[in-house]
Amino acid sequence: MQYQIFVQNQQNNSIASVVGMPNVIAEANTEAEVIAKIKSVLEAQLATGKFMTIEVNPETVPHQETTQMKYAGIFADDPSFDDFMEKLAIIRAESNAHTDE
């Protein structure tokens, strides 16, 4: 199997981690050494467990309202909203004009 790793080369060493598996990390003096080391660490991790796919019934998971949805529609009945949006468009156009200069 193939796994993606993230390698960070620092001044004195290199650090590697397996993407999606934050607890699988290795550190070594060179990039080549850290790649070999992370491969060994991953193999050891996989030897003690396995990947499985499970299905969760969405009806049993409590509904969690996201912050954005919490405020959706709060200006629906605000009579000054259109005026606000027009003023905002003018401000943005002026800002873009200054940025383009």
Image (tube, helix red, strand yellow):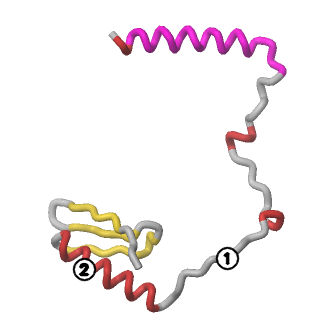
Residue 80 colored in magenta in the image: yes
Q: Residues within 10 Å of mark 2 (few under 14, many from 20)?
A: few
Looking at the image, residue 23 sits to the left or right of residue 32; the answer is right
Amino acid tagged 2 = Ala
Looking at the image, residue 53 sits to the left or right of residue 27; the answer is right
Q: Quadrant of the N terminus?
A: bottom left
Quarter residue 64 falls in: bottom right
Q: Residue at x 28, y 64 (%)?
A: 7
Secondary structure mostly seen in the magenta stretch: helix
Q: Residue at x 22, y 67 (%)?
A: 14
Q: Residue at x 53, y 11 (%)?
A: 91
Q: Report the span colored magenta.
A: 77-98
Residue 90 colored in magenta in the image: yes
State the SS at label 2.
Answer: helix
Q: Quadrant of the C terminus?
A: top left
Measured as percent of width and height from the top left, residue 10 is found at 20, 60
* Distance CA(mark 2)–CA(mark 1): 32 Å
Residue that extends furthest to the bottom in the rendered view of this protein: 47
Whether residues under marks 2 and 1 lie with C-beta atoms below 8 angstroms apart, the answer is: no
Q: Residues within 10 Å of mark 1 (few under 14, many from 20)?
A: few
Measured as percent of width and height from the top left, residue 38 is found at 31, 77
Looking at the image, residue 88 sits to the left or right of residue 100; the answer is right
Measured as percent of width and height from the top left, residue 70 is found at 75, 40
State the SS at label 1.
Answer: loop
Residue indicated by mark 2: 36
Indicate which disc residue 54 carries. Answer: 1
